Amino acid sequence: MDDFDDEDGGRHAGGPKAFIDRQEQPTRVGLICPDVRGKSSYHSIEARQAEFEGLAEAIRLDVRFSDVVKVREIRPATYIGGGQVEAIAEKVKAEEIELLLVDTALSPIQQRNLERETGTKVLDRTALILEIFGERAATREGVLQVELAHLNYQKGRLVRSWTHLERQRGSGGMGFMGGPGETQIESDRRQITDRIVLLEERLDKVKKTRAQQRAQRTRAAIPVVALVGYTNAGKSSLFNRLTGAGVFAEDLLFATLDTTVRKIELPHGREVMLSDTVGFVADLPHDLVAAFRATLEEVVDADIILHVRDIANPDNAAQAQDVLEVLDELGVSSETTPVIEVWNKVDLLGEPGFALAGASPAGKVLATMPVSAHTGQGVEELRALIEKSLGEQSRTYHVHVPHSAGADIGWLHSNAEVISRDEPTEKGQDYVVRVDPRHKSAFLERFNGRIALSDL
């Protein structure tokens, strides 16, 4: 197995290797998109094929052919039928294909058999997404998250590489007592398991650090607005437009992996933290969702979610459903967190409003807002909508604090937004405060009998 870098820059045997070799010349690949009869999908086969081609282009592979293959019944040995495998093998030989990518999750046996039958390396959809994530990860946290997902995927596939007795090592032929010792595959699996435990410990520290940062924002009563959406929907471009930041944004799938948080000011001066997150995709590997959970907890704890949709993409309704499924896996729904749908890329629709006429929100939303992160159209209106929505979620109260209750003043400054306060009197001081829903029950319990709703 290849070496990999440890945190201190050292090298360890037993780590993951890149699935795709990095060469001066792009790897020649063929794409197979199985169309399984009776398998339900939000996406048309044409949309799925186009997206798979986009995934391959995201790491600049040399795509020599892209074929849809009809599958009447999934074969346990090769996934697709024998005649189709033969036809693909001929094409692989004719095009001198170095790598065959299959747009589905293959079992280790199916992967191995396809490699044997086609005479070339085979990777499935999960492996390709992991490869893209591995190339995109820029921060230490991102690298750890991708490596963890990569190792969990690889752990169950070691059988691909070691199938012969000569791979067995130990004390057997050295004249010592005892059996032949552990096999190479057992050794490699053990090393991978040890590395997984180490990565999980490091990511747990990241999780605790993020929790502390969120607690600080909570104490400062700064609401969090999280951007979510299908990959390449324009989240990072919108983030840059709203914040003036220089987050990497390109017309590529998974251009952004690492969560970025910036403070922005709304039209009437209220500050919020805006969080840009990794894009979602159909059939996003569960190992990746699990590995990125620490990052995606920014979404779980958000006060408002901006679901960014590429409204100019004909497949955007299906993409929106995929986003909702990942959110559901994270335990987030419109019932627990208000959602605003941001219909991005309206500048690509041609006649104003023409394609929006048939658009509809995915699930329950507070509102929809058409924008163009590219031109800036609708962005200021979106700011105003965020402010209005936060105001509707919060309530404004008059509260009286006697001089003897100094701790209550500290609580208000830590857990609410102090809008104004009157001059102190002999009895104490009156405040006007805005309280977010997450603090409402604690506020009502603490200040029971001393509050009244404000008209602000």
Image: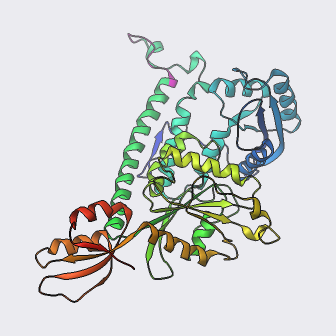
Residue at image position (47%, 46%) is: 331
| Along the viewing direction, whichever of 74 and 454 lies nearer the viewer | 454
Q: Is residue 257 above or below residue 52?
A: below
Res 102 visible: yes
Q: Where is residue 300 in the image (x, y as percent from the top left)?
A: 45, 54
Q: In this view, does 387 lie above or below 27?
A: below
| Along the viewing direction, whichever of 149 and 75 lies nearer the viewer | 75
| Along the viewing direction, whichever of 198 and 226 lies nearer the viewer | 226
Is residue 19 rendered to the left or right of residue 454? right
Residue at image position (82%, 33%) is: 69
Q: Where is residue 343 in the image (x, y as percent from the top left)?
A: 66, 64
Q: Where is residue 368 in the image (x, y as percent from the top left)?
A: 62, 65
Q: Position of residue 29 (x, y in %)?
A: 78, 42
Residue at image position (69%, 73%) is: 374
Is residue 324 rendered to the left or right of residue 208? right
Res 246 visible: no
Q: Give the range drawn in magenta.
A: 176-185
Q: In this view, does 318 lie above or below 37?
A: below
Is residue 87 rendered to the left or right of residue 25? right
Q: Does the magenta stretch include residue 456?
A: no
Q: Residue 82, located in which quarter of the rendered image?
A: top right
Q: Quadrant of the C terminus?
A: bottom left
Classified by dominant secondary structure, the portion drawn in magenta counts as loop
Residue at image position (78%, 63%) is: 355
Q: Does the magenta stretch include residue 179?
A: yes
| Along the viewing direction, whichever of 361 and 275 lies nearer the viewer | 361
